[in-house]
Amino acid sequence: MLNLVHPDRQPVRNSNFQRYVGYNDKTEMSRMLSKLYTDAAANGVCITAPIPNPSQNELSKLMTAVNFNRTSVNSDEVLEDMLTLSQRGLVKLDHYIKGLQTKDAADTVYAVIRDAAARSVSQSAFKNTYVKLICWLARYSEKPVNSVLYINDEVSKYDIYYLYLLSRLGLKVTMFSFSDNGAYAEADPSGVFSETTMGNLHEKFELKFSKIDPKNIELIKKMYETFTPQVTRNVQNITTSVDKLPEDIIESHFQRISSRGNHFNKSELTPVYSAAMIGYNEKDIYTNILYEMKNNLSKSDKLMLFVSNGFKNPDSEQVKIFADIPRDGSLDVESMIDMLAMKIEIKNKPERTPIVRYAFIEEMKLMNASSPETVFVHGVKLISWFMLCVSSDAYRMSSEIPIIFYYGNITLTELMFLHFASRAGMDVVYINPDKSCYDMVANANAGHKMQIFELPNSMAVEPFPTKPVKAKIATVAYNAERELDTMLYNDSVFFRDFQFSKLTSMTLKTTYEEIDILWHQEAKYRSGFRADNDRVIIPNIFAKISGVPDGNANKYWDDVRSKLSPNTIITTKAPSVRHLTNATLAPYRPFYNGTTVDIRKLKSSPLNKYGFLSDDLQYLIFEKIQEVIDSGYLKVDPQIVAPLVLYVGTNFDRALLRLLQLYDFTKAIPKFIIIDNIEDTFSEVECTQLLLINSLGFDILIYTPTGYRNLESYIDMNAFESYTMNDFKYDLRIPKFKLPDAASAKGGGLFNKFRKKGR
């Protein structure tokens, strides 16, 4: 039996009923509604006008089973009505929810009409609501209904009661209106029927929904179901330097994984390089570098597609597979993208198909195209070129990451293809000695992770070198100077203080026992540490320890003390009191587009509270904000991921900022320790803080003697390691912890005399 309470005292908002009033981003809202319309057209109901009142035919048909002349009914009478309607096939409850019991449906109907009656002084309100709800239940149960989309500004309170009823039955209901006519508040004054999102913009725009064959709608739905987290995170960009590029791109798939902690297998992770080298330095040296790069790739196990004269437009044979895609204006942009994506089939390696389809969809979204025809023309080229790369037996038999080596002048569509190929799991290298293309390449890189190296000189594109040329030979003194610099400043001996301004953190997959071994190691001594140009790869620890080993509390607290160092923040979990609101996140919405943060705009805005920090450190924090947004590890509504991470990332406290300022990325790694001894789970804000701190290279330990859930509430389990002990303790008294003395921890020695104070 449902718990019927007064409608103004219902404690929990209904998560099955999502209501949107207005919008913040027209493009994003159009795409969301288009996707919901497609789903509703295939498996549900889409309502774009006030729900028509019951017709005389409908009333006559149902009055054989229900007495509509009653001015009130009790719960038993509603149950009797629902049983009769169900038995006669007038209301097909199974079409709403498979296995829905008649009594549960009756209880829900009764609860909703009680809600309606409680809000009205009219004697007829009860009857009117009951008649309409029963008739509409019958009308829309003619076919299976999995979801409901309601788009209308002239909403009535009875429409809202019906949508609320469906959501209470268990259906997913979405309601959108450009503005609020007040009817919703009349029906739901406490705002508990739905989860409501209020936008800042209310200007009407035309909503165009595609007319897709229901079979294709089902295929598109199944395609999206294949986009699992393992698929969407399979391809990751890794970085190099202009000097190491020729060497790094030859690195095998296995070497790339093992050098990054070795906690993935080749099917789980495809680390790729995406780089452009624009301009040249010394011509002879540049010529030899190009020749050696191509020559070494040809000799390696990697499959290489070398392009020096651009891509040819697809021929008639290649475009045959796209002939059945409508081009008569019946598809919107998003549906056109989906239809094109379904044409991608990697027959030689079918496990790559969902990865490539996902990459294609993400790439095409960045076009922000307003015309489906434009999408079709570009999409056909991208897919046709890609299929040429993967259709050979050599691709099927190779276990290595292929590379596309593009030399010379390039078009925007070809550049778009390189970005798509990189997203799909291929190395991409673009080289052009003519710097006139630099702005085009840089502008096209928005939303991508291609590294662009600009060399000092520029010249017209010449034919690619087919042989090495005689170049200058370095003197003994010059070589000696370079060797000394290498010896002093690379990872084989030691590094200059604060030599690096950028970092990439890689969470280590360890055993519980290994934490003690690794915890106080400097970054440069950890397995997987690597230095590239001005960036270092820092293997760090992000782990949750649930329970108390053997129930020994004293030994447990000693273990915590052993983890403390001068550069540690240790805190205890307190009840979460801060709740995110639209007003809290609204100031951050102008600083991102989709999921891409406008870092330059953010840096110069009043929201940037880090102006007292160095530019390098500010850019590092903003880079990590983008990284956490892109990671997919934050389990919150996708609509609030970007503003949530921006909000948290621009509000670090001073203690954390000071540790970050003192952090020399090759040396002692700062620590963040939380002791969680209460029942409250971590909030969205706390979980976002942890992901950002982890991304900034800190070691993190969450001690949870109770074994309760905490960070799992909003953080994907793949983001951290979890260890469970053999006993749990509750209501432990947490001792006071004192950090070790900084001076004694630093020790003496010659090098300490030259130690810098920080960034």
Image: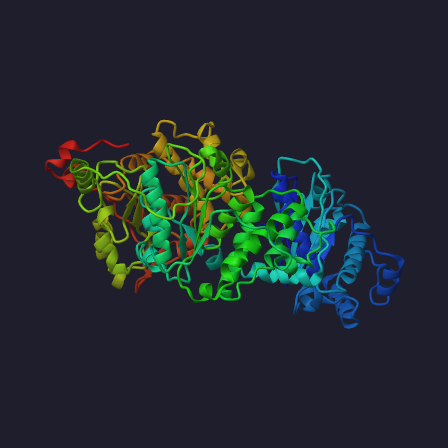
Q: How many marks?
A: 0
Residue 424 point in image, percent of width and height: 48, 54
Query: How is colour applied across the structure in the image?
Result: rainbow
Instruction: Specify whether residue 254 is in view.
Output: yes
Q: Position of residue 500 (x, y in %)?
A: 29, 38
On the picture, is 146 further left or further right than 571?
right
Q: Is residue 566 above or below residue 210?
A: above
Location of residue 125 in the rendering, given as x and y in whole percent from the top left corner: 79, 50
The part of the image, by quadrant, that contains residue 205 is: top right
In this rendering, position of residue 462 left or right of residue 584? left
Kindly indicate the quadrant of the structure image that contains residue 618. top left
The residue at 54%/61% (across/down) is: 226
**Towards the viewer: 495 or 426:** 426
Name the residue: 81% across, 49% down: 123
Q: Is residue 512 left or right of residue 443?
A: left
Q: Of all residues shown, which one is farthest toward the left?
A: 749
Evaluate whether residue 576 shows in this view: no
Location of the N terminus (image quadrant): bottom right
Tell me the quadrant of the picture where the C terminus can be found: top left
Closer to us: 32 or 554: 32
Q: Residue at x 86, y 67 (%)?
A: 64
Q: In this view of the protein, which residue sits in the foreground, 69 or 560?
A: 560
Of 212 and 61, the residue lying toward us: 212
Residue 466 x %, y %? 38, 48
